[in-house]
Image: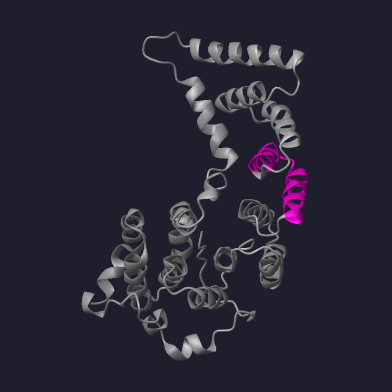
């Protein structure tokens, strides 16, 4: 139970560190539309000190009417469409945002950000089927699109369909080599592995989560994200002696802007070992854990262990 509370409390921070580090384009997915509309509504409801309580709301509505008037004459005016979308977001009105967003997605089929935001918006208003359909349309054209992949995985997990999420990610990894030969870099295998590890951890499948993180570590020993993910899982499982050196290694590999966040995640775990035991960035991360345990780790294992970390 303790590991469950720990992991869920740190989920947003973990997700931010693991994905923002090397995937700048994930900024959209890491600010789900739910949060966008909620924060937008708060902004709309907060008047400035010198304005009347209704002035902010009235100003937004006046802007919406102006954009709507333009769109009546020019239905495909993208400046007006984007302006209306921005207003609806600030108003916290997801349903009203659908129309301009759908039109922007139609007019810009190569800009998947609009499609991802459309999928998130559909999910926000309760249209999970429509949301999944949009995500799948994106993935049919770009199976490695991490915005769409993570969005669909999150949707599946929320719908209590973790096995479907795991199968989707495993299928993506299976086709990665072939896809990357045709279009180099189209599927970031490390990022897909990280997401799979998060789902395994959410499902209390610690051994499988650790195994997939080990695979990611082997793929790039200078990438701090799988090292951090493994440390978090070990910590949540109560294996602080194993986790502490990995937290230190992750911090040494990570860009400076993430080091404070890693220390925050590690908490008291770093007191579990002497600083002299810190791993060198060139030392295999596996040295921080029981070699027999790691040697026996099997990414296809179906065993479950107690605890519920979620490496997001």
Counting from the top left corner in percent of width and height, residue 308 is at 52, 66
147 relative to 131 in the view: left or right: left
In magenta segment, residue 261: no
Check the image and report above or below for 112 versus 166. Answer: above
* Main SS class of the magenta portion in the image: helix
Residue at (77, 50) in percent of width and height: 137
**Residue 143 image offset from top left, x and y in percent:** 70, 59
Magenta stretch in the rendered image:
113-141
Q: Is residue 312 left or right of residue 77?
A: left
The residue furthest bottom is 292
Q: Quadrant of residue 34?
A: top right
Residue 168, position in %: x, y?
Answer: 71, 64
> 182 or 201, which is in the foreground?
182
Q: Is residue 138 magenta?
A: yes
Pick the residue in front: 126 or 26. Answer: 26
Q: Residue at x 59, y 69 (%)?
A: 200
Q: Position of residue 55 (x, y in %)?
A: 49, 10
At 40% from the left edge and 79% from the top edge, which residue is drawn? 285
Q: Residue at x 56, y 70 (%)?
A: 204
The colouring scheme, among rainbow, by chain, secondary structure or one colour, is: one colour
Look at the picture and state if 159 lies above or below 41: below
* Number of numbered callouts drawn: 0
When asked about the image quadrant of residue 38, the answer is top right
């Amino acid at each position: 139970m303790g590991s469950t509370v720990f992991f869920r409390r740190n989920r947003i921070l973990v997700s931010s560190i693991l994905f923002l580090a090397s995937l700048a384009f994930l900024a959209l997915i890491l600010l789900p539309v739910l949060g966008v509309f909620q924060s937008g509504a708060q902004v709309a409801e907060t008047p400035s000190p010198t304005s009347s309580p209704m002035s902010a709301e009235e100003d937004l509505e006046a802007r919406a009417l102006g954009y709507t008037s333009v769109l009546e004459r020019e239905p495909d005016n993208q400046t007006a469409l984007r302006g209306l979308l921005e207003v609806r977001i600030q108003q916290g009105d997801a349903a009203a945002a659908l129309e301009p967003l759908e039109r922007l997605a139609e007019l810009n089929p190569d800009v998947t950000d609009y499609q991802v935001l459309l999928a998130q918006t559909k999910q926000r208003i309760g249209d999970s089927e429509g949301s999944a359909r949009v995500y799948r349309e994106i993935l049919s054209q770009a199976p490695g699109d991490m915005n769409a992949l993570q969005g669909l995985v999150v949707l599946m997990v929320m719908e209590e369909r973790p096995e479907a999420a795991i199968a989707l990610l495993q299928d993506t990894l299976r086709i990665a080599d072939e896809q990357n030969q045709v279009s180099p870099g189209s599927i970031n295998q490390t990022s897909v592995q990280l997401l799979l590890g998060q789902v395994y951890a959410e499902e209390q499948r610690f051994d499988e989560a650790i195994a997939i993180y080990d695979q990611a570590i082997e793929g790039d020993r200078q990438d701090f994200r799988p090292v951090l993910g493994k440390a978090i899982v070990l910590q949540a499982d109560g294996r602080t002696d194993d986790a502490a050196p990995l937290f230190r290694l992750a911090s040494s590999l990570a860009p400076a802007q993430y080091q404070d966040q890693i220390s925050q995640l590690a908490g008291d775990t770093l007191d579990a070992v002497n600083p002299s035991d810190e791993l060198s960035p060139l030392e295999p991360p596996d040295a921080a854990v029981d070699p027999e345990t790691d040697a026996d780790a099997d990414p296809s294992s179906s065993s479950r262990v107690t605890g519920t970390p979620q490496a997001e």
